[in-house]
Amino acid sequence: MRPLLKKTLLLLFVACTLGVLALVVFPGLKYEIYRRLPPDIRWDISYAVTDKFVVGMVYFVERGDQLLMVRHTYQDKWALPGGWVERHESFEESARRELNEELSVHLDDFEVLEVNKVPRSGIINIAIRGRLQDEEVAIRDSEIFGYRFFDLDKLPDNVIYTHKPYIQRYLQEHARRSQAGDIPDAISPEVPGIELPESEVPEGDTETGESAGADNPAP
């Protein structure tokens, strides 16, 4: 029994070695083999060998010339609202779901601003903007401590570092559009922001963390 097993293993090893050598010597061979496989098997192979990505989003919620920012319980800095795209969702569907779940916010004039691949990670970030649709803003997510609308020329300095580049590019694009007259006049609903003095920041983890849609996945 043992000699037969050894011979079988040896034949398998030789066959695998010859197969690898054939693929190295004839690079086009693997594509010819792949092309002749059934579609279902080709799909499984493609899915297994391609890179996988997590898609995060940051949201620019506009109220006239103001921008909505939030404070999380695990951060001592301001951040843009954020979220993750779930399977089979479009960007717009994801943004509407996340903002409704977290802040009961509904948007008009929806627009994708930019799509970025985070270096050395499997994360793609999408920046979304939209105008506040109505007056209702209500915190629904226990991780959000408070929110506030800031004038675009008076945005806070203490913003998490991963969101600062997005805000800088957003302001540059907003200024360009304003000069070109591309930004339509909009009604600004009266939504009271929640003032959050430094003394009211919750105790606990005060390190600069990553919100959903930042460089690292939220827990």
Image (tube, helix red, strand yellow):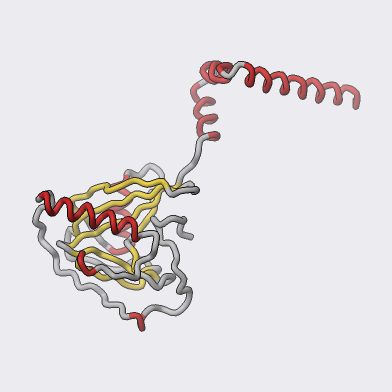
Q: Position of residue 106 (x, y in %)?
A: 23, 57
In the rendered structure, the answer to whether residue 42 lies left or right of residue 67 reads right
Q: Position of residue 205 (x, y in %)?
A: 48, 73
Q: Residue at x 35, y 67 (%)?
A: 159
Q: Position of residue 203 (x, y in %)?
A: 44, 79
Q: Position of residue 188 (x, y in %)?
A: 13, 63
In the rendered structure, the answer to whether residue 154 lies left or right of residue 84 reads left
Q: Residue at x 72, y 23 (%)?
A: 16
**Extreme bottom residue here?**
199
Q: How many marks?
A: 0
Question: In the picture shown, does residue 185 fall above or below 39?
Answer: below
Give the quarter of the image for residue 12: top right
Instruction: Name the quarter where the N terminus is drawn.
Output: top right
33 and 79: which one is in front? Answer: 79
Q: Residue at x 48, y 46 (%)?
A: 122
Question: In the picture shown, does residue 112 fall above or below 15?
Answer: below
In the rendered structure, the answer to whether residue 90 lies left or right of residue 186 reads right
Q: Residue at x 43, y 62 (%)?
A: 210
